[in-house]
Amino acid sequence: MSTLSFDSLNVGDVLPPLALAPINRTTLALFAGASGDHNVVHIDLDAVRRAGMPDVFAHGMLSMAYLGRLLTQWVDQRQLRQFGVRFVGITQLGHQITCSGRVVEKFEADGEQRVKLEISTANQFGEARIMGDAVVAL
């Protein structure tokens, strides 16, 4: 995490990307245990195949957590004012996720200087998995 100032940032500036290891079954099992989300689509191959899917897939909230890591490696978590996403694609086993963000607006609110960020995850094929935004105070 670096020390940033409102004046040093410009619209269009990008956050350092966060590249992650490929999603595997161990990651899904650990996240299920940590989050309490034991939905069968993330952990039970037989149930997923009965539902017509080829294999289990990652929790959407796992990828949102990765985006949270992107943000908190950029600024202290106490500076986070807003964080929201929409899920636009399934993260499959083996996908190598990269989190990215860029400054899209600078403004003042509630006596603070803030920046709005567009944030997203994409797999190794460049396919978006999550898109969202965040606001941080500087």
Image (cartoon, helix red, strand yellow):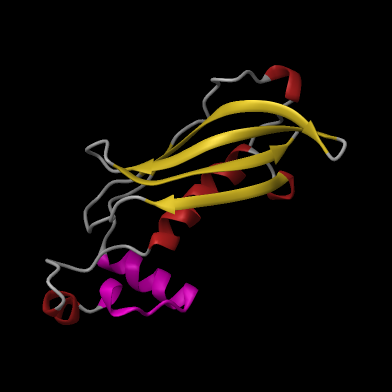
Tell me if 90 is positioned left or right of 134 in this view. Answer: left
Compared with 87, 136 (above or below) is: above
- Which residue is drawn at the image coordinates 61% and 37% (left, top)? 74
Q: Residue furthest right?
A: 111
Magenta span of residues: 25-43
- Give the prevailing secondary structure in the magenta stretch: helix
| Numbered marks: total | 0
Q: Quadrant of residue 90?
A: bottom left
Residue 33, given in percent of the width and then of the height, sits at 43, 77
- Which residue is drawn at the image coordinates 17% and 76% (left, top)? 45
Residue 52, given in percent of the width and then of the height, sits at 12, 71
Quadrant position of the N terminus in the picture: top right
Compared with 117, 129 (above or below) is: below
- Which residue is drawn at the image coordinates 69% and 39% (left, top)? 136
Residue 106, given in percent of the width and then of the height, sits at 69, 26
Tell me if 42 is positioned left or right of 87 in this view. Answer: left
Report if residue 128 lies within the magenta region: no
Report if residue 32 lies within the magenta region: yes
- Which residue is drawn at the image coordinates 34% and 64% (left, top)? 27
Quadrant position of the C terminus in the picture: top right
